Amino acid sequence: MRDGKYVILAIDDDADILEALRLVLEANKYEMIEAVTAEEGLRVYKASKPDLIIVDLMMEEVDAGVNFVKEVKLLGPKPPIYMLTSVGDDLNETISYSDIGVDGVFQKPVDNNTLLKVIKTKLG
């Protein structure tokens, strides 16, 4: 938390997705920090210790998001992490989200009401 606001790290290589997330999050009194690659996201995570993370599954590499989550887990206790994906519900049949360490998944395009409800539930 910074200046009384929860800090959310959003990692996605799509500038439009990041801007849409920023508009929704900041309008609802959250602070958003961002990164456009998993590698940059890891640096930002270490420097800022966000309260919640939203990371795209596929960025510069197909499994960049999964690799990011694994790296964060190695650093010790982690904040809630949510995966963004446009792959669809079929992904749930091939990957166990709890096995890779995420708390849930948001389908693109993200439903703003669902996003805010989940964040409020997780952060209070």
Image (tube, rainbow, N blue to C red):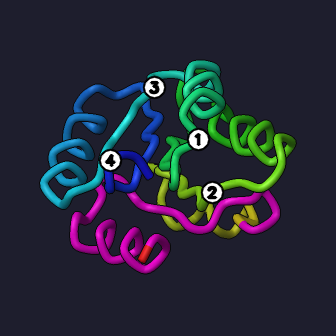
Residue behind mark 4: 3
Kind of residue at disc 4? Asp
Mark 3–mark 1 distance (CA, rounded to whole Å): 14 Å
Of the two numbered discs 3 and 1 on the same chain, state the one appearing first in sequence.
3
Between tags 4 and 2, which lies in front? 4
Between tags 4 and 1, which lies in front? 4
Q: What element carries label 2?
A: loop
112 or 4: nearer the eye? Answer: 4
12 or 44: nearer the eye? Answer: 44
| Callout 1 crowding tier (Cα within 10 Å): few <14, some 14–19, many ≥20 | some
Between tags 3 and 2, which lies in front? 2
Q: Is mark 4 on a helix, strand or loop?
A: loop
Give the magenta range.
Answer: 98-123
Q: What element carries label 3?
A: strand
Of the two numbered discs 1 and 2 on the same chain, state the one appearing first in sequence.
1
Residue behind mark 3: 35
